[in-house]
Image (cartoon, rainbow, N blue to C red):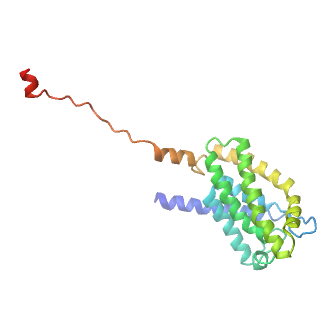
Amino acid sequence: MTNRTLAARDLAHIAIFAALIAALGLPGALSIGAVAVPITFQTLGVMLAGAILGARKGFFAVALFLALAAAGLPLLSGGRGGLLWFTISPSTGYLYGWLLAAVVIGYLTARLLPRYPFWPAVGATALGGIVAVYLIGVPVTAINLGLPLWVALFDSAKFLPGDLLKVVVTVLVARQVHRAYPGLIAPLGRRSASRAAPVAVNAEPVNAEPTNAENAG
């Protein structure tokens, strides 16, 4: 019964954050620069999924959202949806990068818990939410548009101010959530420490009986 309850709770978390990512697409998207990769609030939802749910549930929340969008639901910012945006669109790589972002942020957040210090958390979230996303997004943009890699990389600089702000917002929100609900992500440090902890064996001293030779002496 406990396992079923936990599984149901995990599914609820995944569904809630998939819905959150979708809701953050309602304000629409802003296109700036020569390359048509829009600026959207949905990356904030991806960062929050990783930082609050952890690597596994965060990944599934993003995967659920992307699967629904690929199936044709207009869940991407600006009311977009369908396989086109996951194949030949300039933003295709960034969408797949969201999956890696959730995993990286979730894993590093688990390493920082239960303390979750601010600046290390900012670095961990930026590594997953910015570096990991760009690592996939920029090359795929260059391939799909037939651009030199440096052009796509230069164009991605337009995302940095907003993404850095999303990183800070994510850390501030995640800190409060983990204080209120400390069991959402199992800290990796605590898990490994419990595995490595030696098992104490209660050994009582044995009083040796004197041998016959000792009695004779």
Left or right relative to 53: residue 98: right
Q: Point out residue 97 in the picture as x, y percentages from the top left corner.
A: 73, 65
Q: Quadrant of residue 148?
A: bottom right
Identify the residue shown where x is 75% and y is 68%. Answer: 95
> For the C terminus, which image quadrant?
top left
Give the residue at x 27% y 32%.
204
Q: Relative to 211, is 161 on the left or the right?
A: right
Residue 200 visible, this angle: yes
Residue furthest out toward the top: 217
Image location (x, y in percent) of residue 33: 93, 65
Residue 14 point in image, percent of width and height: 64, 62
* Front-lying residue, 130 or 175: 130
Q: Residue at 66% x, 53% y: name it.
A: 52
**With respect to residue 79, does 47 lie above or below?**
above
Instruction: Name which quarter of the figure residue 77 lies in.
Output: bottom right
Dividing the picture into quadrants, the one containing residue 189 is top right
Q: Is residue 203 left or right of residue 118?
A: left
